[in-house]
Amino acid sequence: MNQPFVLSTSSRTRPSPYYDATVAAGVQGFSVYNHMLLPTFYVSAEEDYWPIINGVSMWDVAVERQVELRGPDAAVLATMLTPRDLSKMKIGQCKYIPMVDHNGGLINDPVLLKLAEDHFWISIADSDVRLWALGIAGALGLDVTVTEPDVSPLAIQGPKANDVAASLFGEWVRELKFFWFREFDFDGIPLVIARSGWSKQGGFELYLRDGSMGTELWDRVAAAGAPWDIKPGTPSTLERIEGGLLSYGNDMTLENTPFEVGLGKYCAIDQEADFIGKAALQRVRDEGVTRNQVGIFIEGDKIASNTRRWPVWSMDDEIIGEVTSAAHSPRLERNISFAILDMAHQEPGTPVRIDMSDCLAGDGSRDIREGSVAPLPFIS
Ligand code: THG
């Protein structure tokens, strides 16, 4: 897509602590996420992708804002906010926690960090979780503060991330387990270092606890990564569709329950503790879903990205669902996508048609493609 406009910015589209460093590194595109600017590419989606697969890449993901829960009832509130079972969660652990409303609709799919028994960070995808958490805390009369602290993640992702992190922080970091973290004073730069990140290639997220030190942290990571040819990058739509990672607002919204988008495995709906949406999710479980997420291979020219959800038709010209995210996979050399389709059309190999007409082209041109249903993930 060739956009005939620029993105106008203001203090409402808050820059990240790494903004100056990313501009100096040659960032060329931004999206808006949690009311902030999210870098989207440096060279091109495909050029930026290969270091994540074969080397190491560093990403400004400060848009993953933290919603901090602190106080005697912080754990009670965290438990109310997700169907995931938190009863055995340890200090120093992260958990991927779908959050749902009273109807079971997805509010967000954040990562939860437990810093102390009375101290949590909800590291959020793109929706206003702080408002939701404040509302629930107030309605339940809980003794907890809900704030947005000055904490901004920088991700290091790719097979060489271990080497870069060890050269920065020491050998101990190689032993850090997946989805665990440690607080670390990095020569005066206050960090929480977690083995996590929005790719399937492995790596770390450095949660910077002082936004005035963004450039300093960026520059130190870039310098330490130079021997491994670290590149500036961004969360990759290509890699994450290949690997089956979902994007809130794209692949799921308030209109979806976790069961429709493969997140049922993170929902302990019969746990002892109460949580928002429990009755609704039990009902959905008992009644079954009417639609479900699948992959679709899309034929024809390389897809750059989708600017809206694309309608999907059966070969009898019935509308059977929508493509929610699409990209060209460099490793499969095919167009791949996530879609939500009616239950009658889930079988891998089922032929479909996709209306990819670009609403932003504005010239009424049509782009109808052939496709076929595929199992997820595309690459495991
Ligand atoms: N990092 C941080 N916060 C985030 C994201 C992130 N918030 C929003 C968004 N990304 C959340 N989305 C995901 C989705 C999947 C995973 C991480 C973030 C993930 N899942 C593990 C997997 O698929 O193997 C399973 C985790 C588990 O078992 O609990 O890594 O990227 N800070």
Image (cartoon, rainbow, N blue to C red):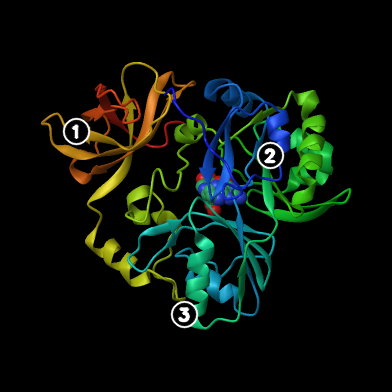
Could you tell me residue 191's position as x and y percent? 77, 52
In the rendered image, the quadrant that contains the N terminus is top left
> What's under tag 1, amino acid-wise?
Trp
| Residue type for callout 2 | Tyr
In this view of the protein, can residue 15 be seen by the observer? yes
* Residue at x 52%, y 76% (from the top left corner): 137
Outermost residue to the top = 301
Q: Which residue is mark 2?
A: 19
Q: Residues within 10 Å of mark 3 (few under 14, many from 20)?
A: few
Q: Which amino acid, mark 3?
A: Ala
Find numbered disc 1 in the image and state the secondary structure of the residue it sits on.
strand
Residue 187: image x %, image y %?
89, 48
Q: Position of residue 70 (x, y in %)?
A: 65, 72
Residue that carries the numbered disc 1 in the rendered image: 313
Question: Of circles 3 and 2, which is in front?
Answer: 2
Mark identifier at residue 139: 3
Q: Earlier in the sequence, mark 3 or mark 2?
A: 2
Can you tell which mark lies on residue 282? none
Alpha-carbon distance for marks 3 and 1?
Answer: 44 Å
In depth, the one of 114 and 235 nearer the eye is 235
Distance from Cα at disc 3 to Cα at disc 2: 37 Å
| Mark 3 / mark 1, whichever is N-terminal | 3
Cβ of disc 2 within 8 Å of ligand 1?
no
